[in-house]
Amino acid sequence: MSLKQVKNKIVATKKTGQVTKAMESVSAVKMRKSQERAFLSRPYIRSAIRVLRALSGSQDGLQHPLAQTRSADKELLIIVTSDKGLAGSVNSAVLKRVEQFVAKRGADRIATICIGRKALEFAKRNQLEVVHEFTNVSDDVSLDDVESITTDSLASFVVSTYEKVSIVYQNFLSTFEQEPVVRQLLPLRPEGLDEIVAGIKPRTGKWSDDSALAADAEAVYTVEPSPEVVLDTLIPQLVQIMLYHALLESKASEHSARMVAMKNATDKSKEVVKALTIKYNKARQAAITAEVSEITAGVEAMK
């Protein structure tokens, strides 16, 4: 490689490092906002799911249509990914779980709702049935963003189109750690809801104690005007909250992973620039030494 090529590569690597540094700064701001939203919503979502768990475990809850097992031939899988890449393994880890899910049940028995461009591309690439697609989802996720998904999922399940409704997404643990999880939404299972509650249990504080959660889960509710009316209204809302929670966790995971990936890329670009600079200086010094030797040899020859 010539000196000019090495120099051009140094300049290009520095420019790449500037871009990744800028992306790291942007992702850091988005990460703080998305993490704050995810953390602030966890107490509310955890309480809502505990209520749903108590209701679904009651006699009336077990008889509710949304808690009944269906005999359909297909399952509905809601896949939550990001719209953009450059976020480390945050999307590939989710899609790997989807591959395992599909391999276990068969592609012809799976229908999907794709949230995020990466999920949609994956489904089309693997020829999975796409019932609905949602892309360019705002970072400021609201309950309205998941209302139509909830309505379609509940309606299809009630008329026995699908045997089960599950969701796969990245569960946020920390800035440097995210975990892809598959949760069953329908039919409602008390043990499945316990898994979700355990997954969002804080590491410290009152609700970090499993015994506290277990004791609260045994609360007895007085249902008025009737169990049927209350459950028909409350359960769809609580399922919507579960979907909302998945989107919040996914957004927090995405921006955290992207910030870490861009930081690693920036650090790597600095290492490459340093190595190329050393290589450039060595080559330049060798060229200078060769020129000096040639001049010295010429002078000696003239004598």
Image (cartoon, rainbow, N blue to C red):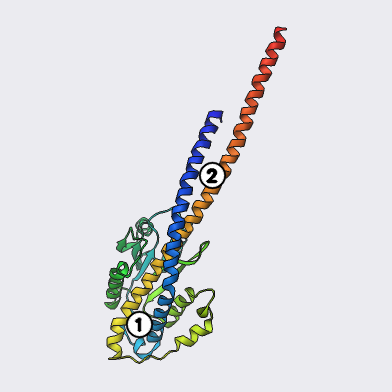
Give me the residue at 40% from left, 76% from top.
44
Q: Is residue 28 visible?
A: yes
The residue nearer to you, when weighing 15 against 137, is 15
Residue 290 location in percent, x, y?
66, 22
Kind of residue sitting beneath label 2:
Ser
Q: In this view, does 238 lie above or below 19?
A: below
Residue 51 location in percent, x, y?
39, 83
- Residue bearing mark 2: 269
Residue 262 location in percent, x, y?
49, 51
Give me the residue at 40% from left, 81% from top.
189
For mark 1, give the secondary structure.
helix
Return the mark for residue 147. none
Bin the neighbour count of mark 2 within 10 Å (Cα to Cα): few under 14, some 14-19, many 20 and up.
many
Give me the residue at 65% from left, 27% from top.
286
- Residue bearing mark 1: 67
Where is the C terminus found, in terms of image quarters?
A: top right
Where is the N terminus found, in terms of image quarters?
A: top right
Residue 18 location in percent, x, y?
48, 44
Q: In this view, does 69 lie above or below 250?
A: below
